[in-house]
Image: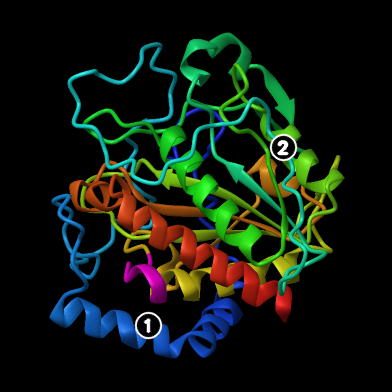
Amino acid sequence: MSYTGPGFDPPRPRRSRLRRPLTVALAALVPGALLGWGVYAAVGGPDDGGDGADRAGSVRTSPAPSSSGPATTDAKKPTGSSPSPTAKSPDTTGTTKPSASASTSVPAASGPLKGKVVVIDPGHNPANFQHTTEINRKVNVGTHWKECDTTGTATNAGWPEAKFTLDVAHRLRTLLEKQGATVKLTQDGDRAYGPCVDERARIGNEAKADAAISIHADGSGSGNRGFHVILPGSVHEGDADTRAIVAPSAELGQRIAGNFVRVTGSAPSNYVGDGTGLVTRTDLGGLNLSTVPKVFIECGNMRDSTDAALLTSGDWRQKAAQGMSEGIVSFLRG
């Protein structure tokens, strides 16, 4: 999910009041994970599965961009065409085929998450580029009106974010179901486009989810690397009222960030979040309209070749899903 383009405005420049306490909380939560990443970066990680991806620990240490924000490459605008057929195909090992409709899983007979409901929101939709009129329709997100959805970004080779998010969502669903959770996807590649951002929030609300996560990958400039988790800021305007979910969402995000570092070996973003892997925003409809604990995760930057090598690796995507799963399990078990 790029910070530019329709539906994804740049984050507001003022610092969040939550940043300092969240930074402290994250540091307290996962010192072992961050230390492990430091060792990983120094000595190298596990084998990359033969797909040509660089080690996750080889994060760049170049200075972050100025406070004016990430590069303004607009990778989210509708392209009107499918990815190039000559682009190298990513590793899709373990990818499950989309079902006929977005469905709720049958709860397991037992498991630590028995009785818990998790909603997974795979960002964007693989067919959005064929429905530019529909996805450009404005919807109310409480604080303002914005486009229903966007096409999402893509790697420089043409592999779309929407396929990445759906693949990771399937992997995450499987892991959570094994823990006994009831899992619902907002879309499973079975819709012509969307759903719109307001409906994505509504699906989680109507499911009375104990936790919800929206999966994305960023479309920032080359050299911008790493993941970050987006937390809802306090909003009380129009149909948006996040005041009750700010604190639990922050805890959910901290636990996901810590486990994501530990399992994937990826570093927090070097271009937003001041190295914490946490960013607070009040412009995203999927968060503004949520009444259940919810976060977004940008798993990496698809426009950076090193991050793209990870994002297109099936082995790495499994680790990403595992990190998210362990963070969600930790949050729900308390």
Q: Secondary structure at mark 2?
A: loop
Name the residue rendered at 44%, 73% in the picture. 276
Name the residue rendered at 59%, 27% in the picture. 149
Which corner quadrant holds the C terminus?
Answer: bottom right
Q: Nearer the viewer, mark 2 or mark 1?
A: 2
Does the stretch in magenta take in 264? yes
Indicate the colouring scheme.
rainbow
Quadrant hosting residue 146: top right
Which amino acid type is marked by label 1? Leu
Residue 294 shown left or right of residue 68 in the figure: right
Which residue is tagged 2?
Answer: 103
Compared with 147, 122 (above or below) is below
Residue 264 shown left or right of residue 105 in the figure: left
Compared with 225, 151 (above or below) is above
Q: Secondary structure at mark 1?
A: helix
Q: Please report whichever mark, 2 or 1, sits nearer to the chain's N-terminal start.
A: 1
Q: From which residue to which does the magenta span run?
A: 262-268
The residue furthest front is: 109
Compared with 35, 172 (above or below) is above
Which amino acid type is marked by label 2? Ser
Which residue is tagged 1?
Answer: 34
Instruction: Please provide percent x and percent y for residue 116.
Output: 78, 63
Quadrant hosting residue 242: bottom right
Q: Is residue 237 visible?
A: no
Q: Is residue 202 visible?
A: yes
Residue 192 shown left or right of residue 157 in the figure: right
Instruction: Please provide percent x and percent y for residue 152.
Output: 45, 32
